[in-house]
Amino acid sequence: MHSVLLSILVAFGGYSLLNVAQASQKIGLARYKTHKLSGAVLWAAATVCTSLSVFVLLWAVSLGSVSIVGAMAGTGLASLAVFSAVVMKERIRGIEIAGVAVILGAAVLIGLFAEEAQAGETAEAGVMVLFVYAGAVAVLFSAAWVLLARKRPGGLLIGGFAGALGGLVPLFQKVSTSTVGRSASWKSSGDAESGSAFVRGAMEILLNPYALLWVVLSILSMLVLQFSYRRDRAIRIVPVFSAVYIVVPVVGGQIGFHERLHALQWAGVGLILVGVLLLTGRFRRGRPASP
């Protein structure tokens, strides 16, 4: 139970770091126009933090349920709303406060039943199921993209595809940290005998084909999301991206790792989705979209 609770806290920190760093990148780019040095330093520091967040989330996945870590993705938006109000001095409306409260309350609800989240040992069969699941998700969104890209919902579908690609990342992060992933490491036998236990473990997790796969998926997700902004407004894409980003790993954790969540944890997942919609509803009054 303690490891699952730690996983929830680490996931909250990782997603918060990611979203706040993205906002800081935007601030750095804006400042660069008038103060080049400070703007460049801020953007560079924020970019480093976005990279670090990936490894924080990798740690979270290694500690507990990938379904819960995936569901916690919405908590980063809550931290971003608080950051916008405190640091960026943006006015936070009642509906946004409600969104933050709902998301944080949902995270607590999930944590209260942490002992109910059970995950089976990763097996070769489970990995094959994940590949089938990932392929089905990719084919579904790709087909919808081809058929509907030029129509009104095209931008939303592309944004959803970006969320799906991002949602697959924690699933393959989980595989890369498992015995299946470690056994497929590219490190040589000589490397295995040298260095500390921590270094050897890190090499096993990061130097295997599943690690390469989640790195590629994260890059593709970012690129597809940027492309979706050319087809529709961010105020419409952000909620779709966020919802799919949460749902894909939650479902994948059930079918690939045989994870089981308590009924109230499922309610917590649903509440996080509601909170995301409340927070992104801030954009419907014509306010610029945050990163």
Image: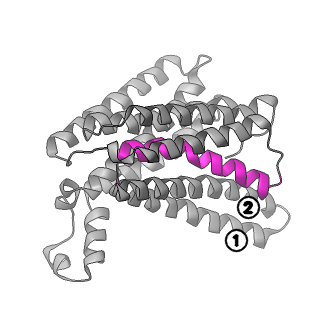
In the rendered structure, which segment of residues is drawn in magenta? 64-89
Determine whether 126 is above or below 121 in the image: above
Answer whether labels 2 and 1 touch (C-beta < 8 Å).
yes
Amino acid bearing label 1: Val
Task: Say if the magenta span includes residue 145.
Answer: no
Give the percent coordinates (x, y) of residue 156.
Answer: 58, 26
- Identify the residue under disc 2: 28
Characterize the local packing of mark 1: few (<14), some (14-19) or many (20 or more) Cα atoms within 10 angstroms. Answer: some
Is 85 a magenta residue?
yes
Kindly report the secondary structure that dominates the magenta region of the rendered protein: helix
Q: What residue type is labelled 2?
A: Gly
- Image location (x, y in percent) of residue 153: 59, 19
Residue 124 drawn above or below residue 50: above
Q: Where in the figure is residue 67, as x and y percent of width and height?
A: 38, 41
- Marker disc for residue 80: none
In the rendered view, does 283 fall on the left or right side of 211? right
Which residue is depicted at the point 83% across and 68% down? Answer: 35
The residue beneath circle 1 is 41
Front residue of this view, candidates 88 and 99:
99
Q: Which residue is drawn at 73% across and 41% down?
A: 97
